[in-house]
Amino acid sequence: MAEIAPWEKPATTALAAEAAPWDQVEKQKLRTFAQGATFGFADEIEALARAATGEDYDEVAADIRNKIKAYNQAYPTEALTMEMLGAVAPTAAMMVTGLGLPTAATTIGKGLQMAGTGAVQAGVTAFGTGEGGIAERAGRVPSAAATGAVLAPVMGGVVAGSGQALNKFTNFVRSKFGDRLAGPVEAEVNRLVQETGKTPDEIINDLLEGRLMTENETLVKSLRAYRGRGGEAGARVGEVIGRRAQETQSRAIDDLQRGLAPKASDNVYRDIRLGEKEFKRKESEAYKDIFAQRQEISRDMIDTLSEALTRMPDAANELNKIYKARGGLVPFFEIGDNGALKIIRQPTVEDAEIVRRALSEATGKSYREGSGSIGEALSDLEKSLRRQLDEEAPALAQTRQNWSTLNRARESFESGRKLLSGDLEERLFSIEEILKRGNEGEIKALRAGFMNQLKNKFATQGTISKRLADENSKEGQIFRAIYPDGPDRQRVIRNLETAGIAKDVERQVKFGSPTSQDLAAAQRIGQNVSAADVQGAAVGHLPSMMRVGSGLIRSISPELTPKQREQVVGIIMTEEPDVLRRAFYDDTAMSALQRKVAQIMRGGSETAKTGILQQLGEQVGEAAPMDFTGKLKAL
């Protein structure tokens, strides 16, 4: 047999159809509900009504019973729940309206009353759900009635006892889900709150710090469902997530720039290059002013110049080119035919600086060509000449230092622009070295270069915020190594996290395709009522009763209207903390609920017992019937 992909649905075979009877069974929700509400007589009532129109009573009754039985077998949990719901409907109606609630009685009298009521309810149900003649159906009554008489007082105490814990449970609900417990909009908001895995207080605090409730990846499937429904709610979801992705990213970039390049404009690269150009112009003016003074140098420095010219190969030719390029500047030396050096005029500070620069270039060239010993000797001579110049011309020393700082800053800026590429440990080491030197110009240039690189990443990569916020990622480690310490650091990281989540939510909701898992999860929402829940509800287990009740309500109530979906989206995507507070904490609604609790719980035992005793009557009567037919024949 050829293999099929998981998403492909194989053709249904006869064997498969036989193995899945629920595909062939028509649901009987209304009839099963009516059976519970009429103590099992609904099938006969319907048969009598249809017989009045000319149909055969026995055939109709048999057909209805067969359909209900098939439904019970195919959908046991649903059928049991619908029958119990029908059974408790009359009592629940009395409790809600306040009519017919049990009155106070003595303990013994109340117990006898419960026993009698239990016997009647169980016995009538056993008779009503039986099949065959009067004798066969009557045989189901004694055992069922006896069971109902014994268990009714016991169950009354068990179920009523749950009322003592209800106030504690209500306080628990308040702490976990807030006070807003009424209406389909509020119910849906509470469901979405639970999906986030956070408490209402945590969600409100997130909003106060700039993060919407919907900026949570656990809500992606729900947001996608709302957007897929269209209408105003769907349009609002699409608009808000798109806008928030842009806003949170812009806020994160602004935060980063305040720490990395606080004085830069929106174009860090332009500011650096223009600043560099202006710096060069000013320093060139400073050099010209110094050289225009024609300051003469000492005899010791002249000796150093002579030694340098002697050691540098082709020194005369190179220096003559420099002098010529400067325009009209006459060299202070000449080389005789015999190669001897002759000083022909008094050298100045400018002459000494020209020779020093030539020495520096020759030193670098020697090292690059592998002549380390020559490079070392020339380097020592260049340092000696520089020290003499610094002593005799302090203004020149400061200008040269400024120029050196500019060159280092330029190198640091270029290093910063490459921090996110290459080896992580090498990059962390380079950051450490620059910070250790403590040169503010270098540090600022490094951070500005990093900011320039980050802006490029933000423009081309949607996940950079998330990676910067992650302390274990390469980007996160480099960011933490270079970003200044201070009180704003954690806020910047949180804003990066928010921007990363907002971008992910936008990508998944607007551009992601629904998967089979998404569809299956959407279908399962609110439908997790199991047989164990029904059994737990039958003995008064409050959480089970809540799950069964809420599941039934969702299964039989209409979905949210477009207007209600708009209201839900307006709440969960609000940027106003007060809106969330009002949605989560409505003390008036909770207080009204608690005032109703006492009245409901006074009749709670009757409600639960009604459904349970009808189920017992049907099941016990079936399990232990008495043979009234045989006794009648004997008589």
Image (spheres, helix red, strand yellow):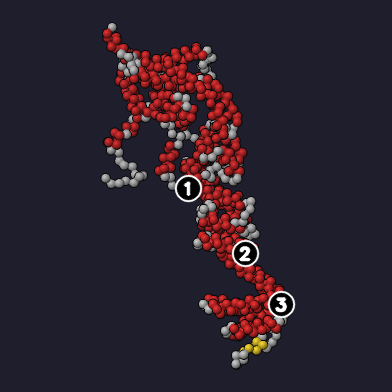
Spatial CA span between label 1 and label 3: 69 Å
Q: Which residue is mark 3?
A: 392
Contact check, label 1 and label 3, Cβ < 8 Å: no
Q: Nearer the viewer, residue 517 or 47?
A: 517
Q: Which quadrant of the rendered structure holds the C terminus?
A: top left
Dot 3 or dot 2: first in sequence order is 3
Q: Which residue is mark 1?
A: 508
Label 2 Cα crowd, 10 Å radius (few <14 / some 14-19 / many 20+)? few
Q: Quadrant of residue 46?
A: top left
Does residue 391 appear in the picture of this structure? yes
Spatial CA span between label 3 and label 2: 28 Å
Dot 1 or dot 3: first in sequence order is 3
Q: Amino acid at mark 1?
A: Gln
Q: Which residue is mark 2?
A: 437
Q: Is residue 5 left or right of residue 556?
A: left
**Residue 179 locus on image (x, y percent):** 57, 32
Label 1 Cα crowd, 10 Å radius (few <14 / some 14-19 / many 20+)? some
Q: Residue at x 51, y 41 (%)?
A: 196
